[in-house]
Structures are given as structure tokens and as C-alpha cells.
Amino acid sequence: MLQQCLWRLTSGETVPSLPRLEGERRTEVCVIGGGITGLSCALHLQEYGIKALLLEAAELAEGGSGRNVGLVNAGMWLPPEDICQRLGKDLGDRANQQLAEAPALVFDLIERYRIQCDARRQGTLHLAHNAAGVRSLEQRHAQFQRQGAPVELFQGADAAQLTGSERIPAVLLDRRAGVINPYAYTLGLARAAMAGGAQLYCRSPVISLQREASGWRVQTPTGSVLADQVVLASNAYTEGEWTELTRHFFAGYYYQVASAPLSGAAADAILPGGQGAWDTRKVLSSICRDTDGRLILGSLGSGERKPASWLRCWAQRIQRHYFPDLPEVEWQLHWSGRMGFTPDHVMRLFSPAPGLLAASGYNGRGNTTGTLVGKGFAQWLAEGSDRGLPLPLSQPVAISARQLRSVAYEAGFSLYHAGQCLKVLI
């Protein structure tokens, strides 16, 4: 198995080689981070006629934006009524409504800018892996029904037909959602932003951020930007001591393993509707097919320091449990991405200082949340209104023991997967 990201290898979008920032530049808004949030912000700023300059420390889409599962999900990880309990009814209703509409925003941008990202808008599937999972889906379904969301619950033979597995007793189908190649989607946003006039620079990590009388000075190793306002959109890939953003999330990881293209009746029965799926495990697994018929399995945790034999063993265990009729599967690729977690599973949107906006902690919902927040930040910068954001700007309390949380989560994920490989768990 090669350690390469499938989404990059199969991307229908490309961006010409972008320069490193050299010398001094002046702009209205400097966006830090070339992922979905930053590029959505830069794109929508151009639509408002506001000059934007974006700095990316590495290359576009090299972070979590280009390495995730590709699910375009509605809402947060929490069910809608749980969100209202946690945030209060008014804020909860606001977040639920805006994030319910976020998939439509993603697919509208894909259509409007003709982004070649293998978009499929047939929904996503939440899979029950046992009886407790069925009860969890039933509760979620009831909440979604009270919200008026187009979400349906299928059980028994109907669930098996949707998934191609007899081992999945129930399925929650969310018709608002869909699947994309996230790497290609991210590059498509970059192409659209540049066409509108945004300046994009790669290999330009920020090393300092300082307030000056005329705005903010953003320093890189080979240049600097003087901007009226700054957007911090680097989320889980934030590095360095120049920002307090890292205090508001702890890092988590997700790995994926992709097969060679599959064919035949047994393969064709897997997710025949083209949906992407994830299950109800505490350490969740995801299942997807790409447009070439590959089977893509993933789970929480990092695969970068695990041997290929270990990842192959895990993938075989999951595949044989759910899809035992498949012939021997050749596993070809694996890759991992980083995400920003928060203890309460709620994102952080805040302004650390005047003229400075920041977002972190999407908890694995970056494709939709990042697109929406990027657009909302642009609206706030253009109009001074936060009504385009799923939550108002706040002053959150820093997360305690971030490094310990990250290490503990990763250790727990690894132990769980080891139990799966040893056939102690499934």
C-alpha cells in the first residue's frame, strides 16, 4: 500500500503552481489558511468587491480539507435537540437552521463555478452497527422529524438493500446531504477565488501577527502583508506561537484505506445509490465508493505511523464483516488527515482582537461548516453583521489539557482498532 491521498490522485481540478509571498503587500483582508474555510472566505469577499490575499503554509488542500471522507453532511455531529439543550433554544435553532442549509450552499457553489469534484447529491447514510445503534438512529430520526428535515429511517431488508450488507440493521438516510472529492472541491474554490481577483500564496507560513496603527502586519519568512483585517482559517493545521487559535481545539486524526477499483455483482451491491456512510460506533468507521468503484474505509485515528500491514489487517476485518461476499480485495492506498476537536462538539467562532476573526473546532464537519463559516466571515467583514454565521462571535474559554486530550484520544482509538484486528471487537 502506498501512503498517498486518493482524492489528490483522482482530482478533476488543478491549480497552477502558486508563488511564495515575496516582499510586502497591502490588502483589505488577509486570510490565513488555504483550506475550505479560507478559500470560501476569499471567494465570497471577491463577490463583495473586497480585496483578499490568502497565505497557505504548505500547498492548497494539503490539510484536512483535501484529506477528509468527502461527506457533505447537514448539521453538527450532535442531534438537533441536543444542540438546543447545549446552546439554548435560540442559538440552537439558529445553528440547526443554517447548518441544515449548508449542503445546498456547497452544491450551489459546485454548480455555479463548475467545480469538477465528482459531486453526488443522493444523500448520506448513518449506519447502525448494533441494537444500541438502532436506538440511537431512532432517536435521531424522531428529532429530525420534529425539525421537518427530509430524513428517513430504514430497517431490515430495506437497510440491507441501501448498503449491500446484512450486518447493518438500520440506516438513517439524509437526503439533504451528499458526497464530493474534497481535494478537488477545495481546488475548485481556489480557482473561483483567483478568477474573482483574490491573491493566493503558498509555501508562506505565518511566523508573526502584529497589530499596527494602520492594521495588522502578517509576517512570513520571505515577506509580509499589511491588512485592515485578518481571518484565521488554519484550524487544526495551525502551527507556531503567533496566534491563540491553538488554545481553542485539540487535534484529532482520521485515516482512510482505499482498494483497487472493484467490479462484479458483490461489489455493485455495496452502496448502490452512491451515498457515503458512517456508523454509530464510539470510534466510528466510514464506508464510501468513489466514481471508479473503489471501496474506501476509514476510522478515527492516525495511520501515518502504523505499518501498512496493520492498516491492511484492519481494512480486511471491516470489509469481511460488512461485505463477506467480496472476493479478495487489493488495498492500494492509505492517508490520514487532522481535524479540530472540542470537548462539547461545538465549533468556536470568535474575534480575539479588533479586526481579527477566527474559527476552529469543526469536529469532522469541515466540508459544509467551513464553506458556511467562510461565507459568513465575508459577510461580517462586508456588512458588519454575523447573521450569516451559524453562531454569533463569542469569547470562548480556552480548552484545558489539549495535548493530553489529543494523546488520550489517539491511544483509545488505536486500542479499539487493535481489538478489531485481533477479532476481539467489531
Image (cartoon, rainbow, N blue to C red):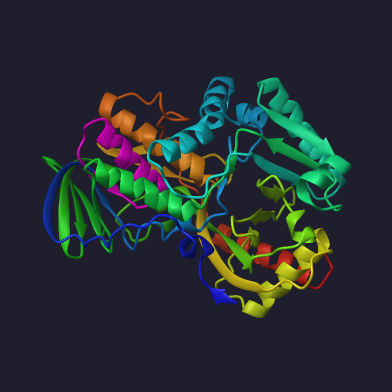
Give the quarter of the image for residue 123.
Answer: top right
- In this view of the protein, can residue 245 be seen by the observer? no
Query: Residue 206: percent from the left, percent from the top?
Result: 26, 58
Query: Residue 212: percent from the left, percent from the top?
Result: 14, 44
Q: Residue at x 60, y 59 (%)?
A: 292
Magenta stretch: give its range: 30-52
Give the quarter of the image for residue 74.
Answer: top right
Left or right for 202, reference 344: left
Query: Residue 99: percent from the left, percent from the top?
Result: 53, 32
60 lies above or below 374:
below
Q: Is residue 176 within the magenta segment?
A: no
144 lies above or below 77:
above
- In this view of the protein, can residue 334 be seen by the observer? yes
Left or right for 63, reference 70: left
14 lies above or below 420:
above
Q: Is residue 51 within the magenta segment?
A: yes
Instruction: Name the quarter where the C terminus is drawn.
Output: bottom right
134 lies above or below 205:
above
Q: Residue at x 69, y 27 (%)?
A: 144
Left or right for 25, reference 278: left
Instruction: Name the quarter where the N terminus is drawn.
Output: bottom right
- Between residue 414 and residue 309, name the one nearer to us: 309
Left or right for 162, reference 344: right
